[in-house]
Image: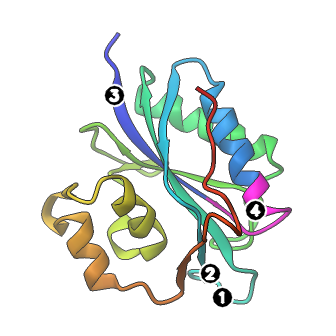
Amino acid sequence: MNTVRAFIGLGSNLADPVAQLQRAVTGLASTPGISVRRVSSLYRTAPWGETGQPDFINAVAEIETVLDAEPLLAELIRLEREAGRTRERRWGPRTLDLDLLLHGDTQSTQAHLQLPHPRMHQRAFVLAPLAELVPNLVLGEHGSISDLLERVGLSGIQRLSAAADPQLRIAS
């Protein structure tokens, strides 16, 4: 089986967001066919889209997987449901949001699966943790992660210190 490197955006702003992200990483690591390699620091971010809600805690996980993009997406949705995620309002508050950002070189324009993620180049809450993991990554015609982050800016993004909220730990 071929192994593919993929990146998952993690976010939560309800029901102890840090614990939600920790459980999500544990869930990813315990899913057959997925190996969690690294997880970025945690970032407190202002809500995007619908602003009248609590701040989010965001991170990005780098994984290796033998799962194709669609089965991987199904696993992410399963983990969201297990965390109590309901999809009532777009950009609304959520217990857990897992976005498949990149899946190797996979490209998809299906309504339910767009890869690379179509808006990640516009979102500092994705770019900041992604830049921590792979600063030289290039997102096609959009450019490098570090250049995109410079363009988008870090307004409303705060990297949490290790003393306040330790980086998500993964079991080896």
- Vertical relation: 153 (above or below) 113: below
Question: In the current view of this chain or complex, which residue is farthest to the top?
Answer: 1
Q: Earlier in the sequence, mark 3 or mark 1?
A: 3
Q: Amino acid at mark 3?
A: Val
Judging by the rendered image, the residue that carries numbered circle 2 is 47
Q: What secondary structure is marked by label 4?
A: helix
At 74% from the left and 71% from the top, the residue drawn is 93
The magenta-colored residue range is 11-19
Contact between marks 1 and 4 (CB within 8 A): the answer is no
Q: Is residue 128 left or right of residue 165?
A: left
Would you identify the image quadrant in which residue 165 lies? bottom right
Q: Earlier in the sequence, mark 2 or mark 4?
A: 4
| Badge nearest the viewer, 4 or 3 | 4
Q: Work out how far the residue at label 4 is from the one at label 3, CA to CA, in angstroms.
A: 28 Å
Q: Position of residue 12 (x, y in %)?
A: 70, 63
Contact between marks 2 and 1 (CB within 8 A): the answer is yes
Q: Position of residue 87 (x, y in %)?
A: 73, 59
Q: Count neighbours of disc 4 (C-alpha within 10 A) and say few if under 14, some if 14 to 19, many if 20 or more.
A: many
Judging by the rendered image, the residue that carries numbered circle 1 is 51
Q: Amino acid at mark 2?
A: Pro
**Residue 17 is inside the magenta segment:** yes
Q: Work out how far the residue at label 3 is from the one at label 1, CA to CA, in angstroms.
A: 35 Å
At 60% from the left and 71% from the top, the residue drawn is 160
| Badge nearest the viewer, 2 or 4 | 4
At 45% from the left and 23% from the top, the residue drawn is 67
Judging by the rendered image, the residue that carries numbered circle 3 is 4
| Residue 118 appears in the rendering | no
In-front residue for pair 106/31: 31
| Residue 146 appears in the rendering | yes
In-front residue for pair 147/108: 147
